[in-house]
Amino acid sequence: MAPWLQLLLLLGLLPAAAPASSKPQAAGAQAWELASPELREPVRFALEMYNRGRAAGTRAALGAVRGRVRRAGRGSLYSLKATLVEPPCNDPTVCQLPVSKKTLLCSFEVLDELGKHMLLRRDCGPVDTKSTDDKNETFSSFLPLLNRDPLPQDFSVKMASIFKDFVTTYNRTYESKEEASWRMSVFANNMVRAQKIQALDRGTAQYGVTKFSDLTEEEFRTIYLNPLLKDAPGRNMRLAQPVTTVPPPQWDWRKKGAVTVVKDQGMCGSCWAFSVTGNVEGQWFLKRGTLLSLSEQELVDCDKTDKACLGGLPSNAYSAIRNLGGLETEDDYSYRGRLQTCSFSAEKAKVYINDSVELSKNEQKLAAWLAKNGPISVAINAFGMQFYRHGISHPLRPLCSPWLIDHAVLLVGYGNRSATPFWAIKNSWGTDWGEEGYYYLHRGSGACGVNIMASSAVID
């Protein structure tokens, strides 16, 4: 394994696998029993990597295993949860007292690309074989650094002060002292994680305290992100006619009046609706000369193909707008951040679309299309965005895989800062996040899958 990948594994920065549960498998994922030959190979590889460097007689054996797979492009990503049994230690030079067999619970993520395996994540810890409650496993995995490697006392004192400032800045209240203590430990762990993300970022981004800093990674993903983007195929759209002219060196639709103010999706995974309305707002402005703030709540309530606050796909949302007969404005159908009964009125619809198109995955062509035709709906992997403050983000590709996109946003422009090329991205987490609600991502490297799912409405 490459040294840099080993470093990422040691730092614990590769994407966490979703905990196994009794919930139905998402579309695009498939579960197998161990007997499946297709599951055996990634399991064998994960066990081999775990035992690498161990002497004969000290290597772990495989116990129970569960797994699922996500397919994309030329490869497959296997998420595995397995028990490993390490042999007893009877060597007096190593163990002062004989030690019985030890059972570990491990989570692995194995990437198989054209038959070549790569271990993206390994997280193992002791487990009580009499109690393997998934809820407890998940809970303990939230704080691996604090649980297994306690931080120095001076760090804890400084972190307490920073956490107090965080609570004041974001007006946090907790139900009990125990809850406040738990949130502080989550906050401290997140600050350590943000520092690691910072150390490995190749751009100019700064990571640290944000309004999401007291949320576990699982909470953040569940509340604010969109799992359907990576799991569901969506509706097929025709390819847009490419723009053949060379794009200008920089472009910003905000300066040209085609972008509404930054909105806030709240505690609802409705980013897909905000991405689409932002695109339609720009298209209507360019075709009709009027910038209207359009209703995301209409899509949350009335798009029956998508899953409201549980996620959705831009391609489905375009279809819903056409089938409904248009979009109402924000003023007429205001945002509530939760699923309600559909109350769309065709008489109040102010905007309509005729079609939707899929755009090129070539970033140069995307820039040319954007400069000529307006803001673009895209989906990205939100790695690091929980702690993003400002600057141009450029994570390592294994950390921000284009196969694991989970957040829909809006490209509104592009340019360069000190020779670093960027996409200017309108997010939907309010103006108290990022650069007044905007995210800047490296342009030209396919960073975080920004070029994988680009689309636009068509207004004749």
Image (cartoon, grey):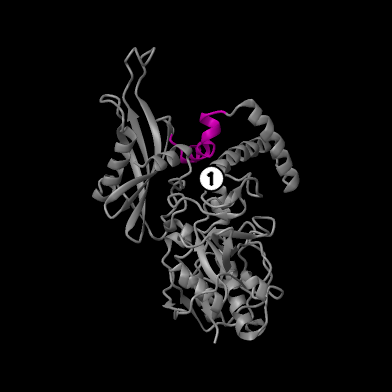
Say which residue appears at 48% left-offset and 43% top-offset. Answer: 13
Q: Quadrant of residue 416?
A: bottom right
Nearer to the camera, 231 or 365? 365
Q: Is residue 141 magenta?
A: yes
Q: Is residue 305 magenta?
A: no
On the image, numbered disc 1 is attached to which residue?
A: 197
Q: What is the magenta range?
A: 132-150
Main secondary structure along the magenta-highlighted residues = helix
Nearer to the camera, 39 or 250? 250
Position of the N terminus by quadrant: top left
Q: Quadrant of residue 179?
A: top right
Three-letter amino acid code at the position of disc 1: Ile
Q: Is residue 165 above or below residue 274?
A: above
Say which residue appears at 64% left-offset and 62% top-offset. Answer: 337
Residue 6, given in percent of the width and then of the height, sits at 40, 39
Residue 277, given in percent of the width and then of the height, sits at 60, 72
Residue 434 in the figure: left or right of residue 357: right
Furthest-front residue in this view: 419
For label 1, the crowd category at 10 Å Cα-Cα, with few meaning under 14, some 14 to 19 and many 20 or more, is many
Q: Is residue 251 visible?
A: yes
Residue 100, given in percent of the width and then of the height, sits at 35, 20
Position of the C terminus by quadrant: bottom right
Q: Is residue 171 visible?
A: no
Residue 314, given in percent of the width and then of the height, sits at 51, 70
Q: Secondary structure at mark 1?
A: helix
Say which residue appears at 34% left-offset and 12% top-offset. Answer: 92
Nearer to the camera, 424 or 191? 424
